Each structure stands twice: as structure tokens, then as C-alpha cells.
Image: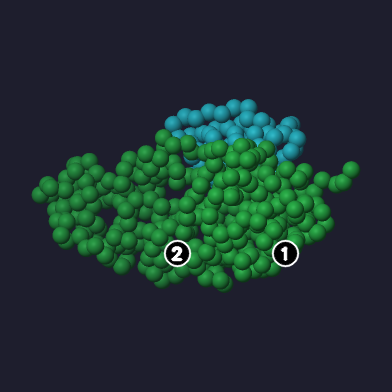
Amino acid sequence: MAEYSIDTQGLLCPMPVIRAQDKVEELQPGDRLEVLSSDPGAMNDIPAWCRINGHTVLEKVQQGREVRILIEVGEG
Amino acid sequence: MSQVRKAAVLVSGGLDSMLAVRVLQEQGVHVEGINFYTGFCVEGHTHAIRKKDQKKDKRNNALWVAEQLGIKLHIVDIVEEYKNVLINPKHGYGANMNPCLDCKIFMVKKAVEWMEKKGFDFIATGEVVGQRPMSQRKDTMPVVSNESGANDLLLRPLCAKNLPPTLPEREGWVDRETLYDFSGRTRKPQMALAKEFGFEDYATPAGGCCFLTDESYSVKLVDLWKARGSRDYEMDDIMLLKVGRHLRPRENFKMIISREEGENNFLQGYKNRYITMRVSDHPGPLVLIDGVANEEELALAGRILARFGKGKRAEEVTVEITPPGEEGYEIQVAPMPPSQIEQNWYI
Ligand code: SF4
């Protein structure tokens, strides 16, 4: 298991979702990816994308306009 | 047991693609969705800019649809490549700056690439013959199939019976008899089928899936190209065209004036790239200056800006001008009387 992080601050939805998706493509099941975003829309969109594609959201925090979401990559 | 065939369906978030997916699922086809992001999509971000819109559900419809249907969704960023589609559309524009036919061809072509990479068997869309004046006409549907390179691997389940049989039909991957023969602009058959499938809460975009079908948006885009002397754009440009009131009092610059708090906050995010201005001794909007303006022109912009704030009846107001990445400075101006604000400044 490895841990990764991407910073999508300054990008508006759905770009944070696209960035997360493209990173997850490179990862192995069990890996973890932290996504940072400044678009509160990511609070809905990234978890929805994870549910659809079989990944798990381990943490989801919003502080002001800053969003941090921790994903565990699923079997795919 | 026969092999399960795999279809990549273009999912926009609207009802038609949702129905197309379900029709294929009913036939035992494995479906995954592809959604393209051009930068002009009505989806996403812009919902959240205006304060009144923030109360609404900010869901991304394509993701929501995929979840309802139980399919995977792949969102593809085509922002850069789309520029060429919009700037030089071989088949021209629709009623506004929407290059729908070239856009469809391009998206299907990208879907073909994706299909080949992922080992899928065919592509499907929710298109209906005669539904849209440009891209969904009887004579343009084959154009999409041919020019995209999809040829007879492109199936339109909602109107397949009005079109020649495609490979998936001829090979029996799907049963042509259970597909549909919708045509024309009416939405009734779609709504009836939605009911049959038990879909209740779906998005119904009126004009199309993107801002390019919007007249006032298109006018702003053309104005931008004209002012710059080139038909190009960056992501910031296309975002800013969605926000605020746009006034061009001089050819060399325009003002983007926020209309409410949400837009104010959004425009704040561009402080490092544009000159911003606001009236500092009265409440009022924030303005972004796009283009180049000298001191005299900034004073003019200040006078116009003052007209849109609470200090509009004051004899004089203080305007703070902040160049990108610098400290702001103040000037005194008299708010411009409404009669001097020319109608043709509004874009
Ligand atoms: S409305 Fe916009 S996204 Fe939809 S086909 Fe036309 S140009 Fe493409």
C-alpha cells in the first residue's frame, strides 16, 4: 500500500474529479490518495465518483473553502 | 453462454443518454459511461457561483445519472483539444456559437479511441433523429458515424429503427426489435419510456448541454475574440464569461461587474491576474478589468462602477484600484449619470 496526494486547488468541478480519476488509474488497489480542492462541489462529486467506480472515501473534511478527501483505491 | 458485449455510452447527464444506457442494460450489455468536459458544460462549478444557486443541489448530473444506473463513469478532459473544434468547425455553428455537429463528431471519435483502448465492443448515444436542428438530423447522423470513424459501431438505441442496422444489431449483440424508433422534437416518447423504467428525477436541459447554445454567452465570446484580434481563449476567459455584467466602454478593455455576493467571491479569486476595482467608501460590486486601460480609462471605469453601488447618488466616491499582485491605491471620482452610460457598452 502506498500513499499519494494531489493538489487541485484553484480548479473548479469537475476538474478535481478528473484529476483524481486520472491519478487513481495509475494506482493499485489498496493504495490511498489524498485530494485537496478549493471547490466545495468536490465534497459531493468526488465521493459520488468513488461510489460509482468502486473506491472508498476514508475521510472527507471541509474547512472554509478548503476540501480534503482521502480515497482508498478499490479493485476497479 | 454467449459473451457479454461491452458498450461505451456518451453520458451527458440528461434523460436521453440515461434511457439509452438502460435500454442496453435491459439487453444484458455491459455498459460504462463516458462524459466529456469541454469547459463550456453547464454542469458543475457555475451552479455554485451565484449565491441563489448555492441552495440548489449542486450534484453533477452525469455522475448522478451513472449512480442511478449502476454504471461506471469516466470523465474526459477535452478542454485543450476542444479549442480547435470551436474555433474552426468544419460544419459551422448552430443558432449561436455552438458547433454541435463538429462537437458530436469529436466526442464520438474520442469515444472510439477509448473503446479501443479498453477493449469495448461498440459505442452508443442517446441521440434521436430530428431532435436537434444541427447534430441530430436524419442527414447529419451518418456524418457523425462516418467522420468520427465509429462507422457502424455507433448505435442509437432510441431511434435505431429509423436508421440502417449497425454491426451490434446485425451480429445480434443487441436485438434490433427491442430498440426504438423515436423521431422529431417531441419529448413525449422519452418521458413515457422514463416512466416505464421508473426514472423520476432527471435533468432536462432546455437548449443543450453547454453554454455555447446560449445567446448572451455567445455574444460575449465573439466580443472577446474581436477585442483580442484572435479567436483564442483560456480557461479563465470562458469561466469569466459566465459571471457578472460585462461592459466594454472602450475597445481596449472591458469591465466584469459582479451582481451579487457569490459573484463577488468568485471574482476575488482572479485578483492575482486582473486589475480589480471597488468603491471603498460605499458598499458595491467588485470589478475586474480585462484588457489594458490607462489611468484616464481606469477613472472612467471607476465612474461607471460607482453607478452600480450604493454610492451612486453621492457627489464623489473613493475607488480603490488594485493591479494584480500589488498594493491598491485610491482615486476620487463622480458617479456617472445613467444617461451617459451607453447602451452599446453592455455586451
Ligand atoms: S450543445 Fe454544446 S456540448 Fe452539446 S453538442 Fe452542441 S456544442 Fe456540443
Give the left or right position of residue A25, taking residue B347 as reference. right
Cβ of mark 2 under 8 Å from ligand 1: the answer is no
Q: How many marks?
A: 2
Residue B270, horizontal then vertical, whole percent: 40, 49
Residue A14, horizontal then vertical, whole percent: 55, 45
Q: Are marks 1 and 2 in contact (CB under 8 Å)?
A: no
What is the residue that sits farthest to the right in this orientation? B1
Which residue is disc 2 drawn over? Answer: B96
Q: Nearer the viewer, residue B166 or B13?
A: B166
Helix, strand or loop for disc 1: loop
Q: Is residue A3 visible?
A: no
Quadrant in which residue B89 is drawn: bottom right
Of circles 1 and 2, which is in front? 1
Q: Chain of mark 2?
A: B
B176 shown above or below B101: above
Q: Nearer the viewer, residue B285 or B300?
A: B285
Q: Which mark is residue B164?
A: 1
Residue B45, horizontal then vertical, whole percent: 48, 44
Give the left or right position of residue B104, taking residue B94 as reference. right
Helix, strand or loop for disc 2: loop
Which chain is displayed in green in the rendered image?
A: B
Q: Residues within 10 Å of mark 1 (few under 14, many from 20)?
A: few
At a point 67% along the width and 61% down the height, the residue shown is B162
**Quadrant assignment for the C terminus of chain A:** top right
Which chain is displayed in cyan in the rendered image?
A: A
Q: Nearer the viewer, residue B179 or A74?
A: B179
Q: Which mark is residue B235?
A: none
Q: Is residue A65 visible?
A: yes
